[in-house]
């Protein structure tokens, strides 16, 4: 479209905008209808203005010969049109085309204006839809934009956009300079698994041999995503009684209010942990653990820094953490693995219910005594007490099973239950941070009603969700644009 025509269109759109506003002065129209009308007209005006600017820049390149590389012959091939879907709407962009054997088709305007090379969508639209898709199902991710901007984006187009952006997250984080901590700080790395509903493959639908499944997995239904969460924190000594009250669900006492009567923050408040970084890896526990520990190792510049690993009893977690520590010579900075006290308390409660019954007044007092012993690192005493109760008390088969579960659990993991030492050093004794991340990063998006995922689709969304939760979306999109214009991302067909 010629510039003169565009200028006339712009003039006409401005007149329409003014007429619309003047009409509202005299019409009986609700304010929200005025907003919609004016906004719609502003979109039309924005599209015309953007088209005018781009056309002027394209016309300025008529007859322009791009700089050729040594030995390269660039031939002018006239004009070629491309589609560009902006926030204002769809436009056709006519620009000069050159061609050479070395680089194929070349568009100087595309290079100067940073037009997307792998999509017709503007980068702004890619970012908005990608960020929405990290939160909502694909159809819902475009619904509000369609309504607001008058677009006609489909759920499938949102899925394709996620398939374009998601695979770039790994290389994005690899390219980022990790923030090195000069001061002696404490770091935490936690890992946990969360099931992701999967699309059944044909063989699985027909029936396949049984295999041993990981924690949280079900035959033919879910696959495991391992979540990695790292952070730094300032050691904070907590009273043992305060931890017990939180585990028993007791209300805060008066001493836990400040002078203005405001409730003090809870022990597991994220404000204790700073610079939290999250990722999730599908079907690759080893990669998740290596990623998290590598992230901490890169940040620990001060030799006096220390790190801890609060985890649950998930299969394979402990062995892989220790293997990494020994392989990289981190023994002096590694303060140990601590078994999540919340999971431990659940075994205590279940044993108490089996022994006393759910409604017994003795139950809570006994739980408190057991937790006091556990937090004093008297796990051996707790095991003996449970064995004595089991052997001296008449219990049903089901109740005896619950007590035996607690005994077995504490016996197998006693070496990770030195809570007294951790509390005295001001270290966390809970893996609440990674438990929360499993919900925020995986469950809230991946387990929405009726959802089933391919491996690739699940990883793409978890990666985009991590970028969003880590607060890195702006930096990530800058990286995407940079990679495309360095020719490091394949062009769209």
Image (cartoon, rainbow, N blue to C red):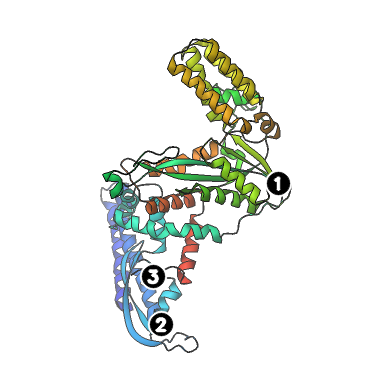
- Residue sitting at x 64%, y 51%: 327
Local secondary structure at mark 3: loop
Task: Tell which of 147 and 394 is nearer to you.
Answer: 394
**Residue that carries the numbered disc 2 in the rendered image:** 60
Q: Is residue 27 above or below residue 368?
A: below
Circle 1 residues within 10 Å: few <14, some 14–19, many ≥20 = some
The Cα atoms of the two marked residues, 2 and 1, are separated by 58 Å
Upstream in sequence: badge 2 or badge 1: 2
Residue beneath disc 3: 491
Mark 1 vs mark 3, CA separation in Å: 45 Å
Name the residue tied to disc 1.
305
For this orientation, the residue located farthest to the front is 209
Q: Are marks 1 and 3 in contact (CB under 8 Å)?
A: no
Horizontal side of residue 301 vs 178, given as left or right: right
Distance Cα–Cα, label 3 vs label 2: 26 Å
| x and y, in percent, of residue 95 in the image | 35, 79
Q: Residue at x 56, y 36 (%)?
A: 431
């Amino acid at each position: 479209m010629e510039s003169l025509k565009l200028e006339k269109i712009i003039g006409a759109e401005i007149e329409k905008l003014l007429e619309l506003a003047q009409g509202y002065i005299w019409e009986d129209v609700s304010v929200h209808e005025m907003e919609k009308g004016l906004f719609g007209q502003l979109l039309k005006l924005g599209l015309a203005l953007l088209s005018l600017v781009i056309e002027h820049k394209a016309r300025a390149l008529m007859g322009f010969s791009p700089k050729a590389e040594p030995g390269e012959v660039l031939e002018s091939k006239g004009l070629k049109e491309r589609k560009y879907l902006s926030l204002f709407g769809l436009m056709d962009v006519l620009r000069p085309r050159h061609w050479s054997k070395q680089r194929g088709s070349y568009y100087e305007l595309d290079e100067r204006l940073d037009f997307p090379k792998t999509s017709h969508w503007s980068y702004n639209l890619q970012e908005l839809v990608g960020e929405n898709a990290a939160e909502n199902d694909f159809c819902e991710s475009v619904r509000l934009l369609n309504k607001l901007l008058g677009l006609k984006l489909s759920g499938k187009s949102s899925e394709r956009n996620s398939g374009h952006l998601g695979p770039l997250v790994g290389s994005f984080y690899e390219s980022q300079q990790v923030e090195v901590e000069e001061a002696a700080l404490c770091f935490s790395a936690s890992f946990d698994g969360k099931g992701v509903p999967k699309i059944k493959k044909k063989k699985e639908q027909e029936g396949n041999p049984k295999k041993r499944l990981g924690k949280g997995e079900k035959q033919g239904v879910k696959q495991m995503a391992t979540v990695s969460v790292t952070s730094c924190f300032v050691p904070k000594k907590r009273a043992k009684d305060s931890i017990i009250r939180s585990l028993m669900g007791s209300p805060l006492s008066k001493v836990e209010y400040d002078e203005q009567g405001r409730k003090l923050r809870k022990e597991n408040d994220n404000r204790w942990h700073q610079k939290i970084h999250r990722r999730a890896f599908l079907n690759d526990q080893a990669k998740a653990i290596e990623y998290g520990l590598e992230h901490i190792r890169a940040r620990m510049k001060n030799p006096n820094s220390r790190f801890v690993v609060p985890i649950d009893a998930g299969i394979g977690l402990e062995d892989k953490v220790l293997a990494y520590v020994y392989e990289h010579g981190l023994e002096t900075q590694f303060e140990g693995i601590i078994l999540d006290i919340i999971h431990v308390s659940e075994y205590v409660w279940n044993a108490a219910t089996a022994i006393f019954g759910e409604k017994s007044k003795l139950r809570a007092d006994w739980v408190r005594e057991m937790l006091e012993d556990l937090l004093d690192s008297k796990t051996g005493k707790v095991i003996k007490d449970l064995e004595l109760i089991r052997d001296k008390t008449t219990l049903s088969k089901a109740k005896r099973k619950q007590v035996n579960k607690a005994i077995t659990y504490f016996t197998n993991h006693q070496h990770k239950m030195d809570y007294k030492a951790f509390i005295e050093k001001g270290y966390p004794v809970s893996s609440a941070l990674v438990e929360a991340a499993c919900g925020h990063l995986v469950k809230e998006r991946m387990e929405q009603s009726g959802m089933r995922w391919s491996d690739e689709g699940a990883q793409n969304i978890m990666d985009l969700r991590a970028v969003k939760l880590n607060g890195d979306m702006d930096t990530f999109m800058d990286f995407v644009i940079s990679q495309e214009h360095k020719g490091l991302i394949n062009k769209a067909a």
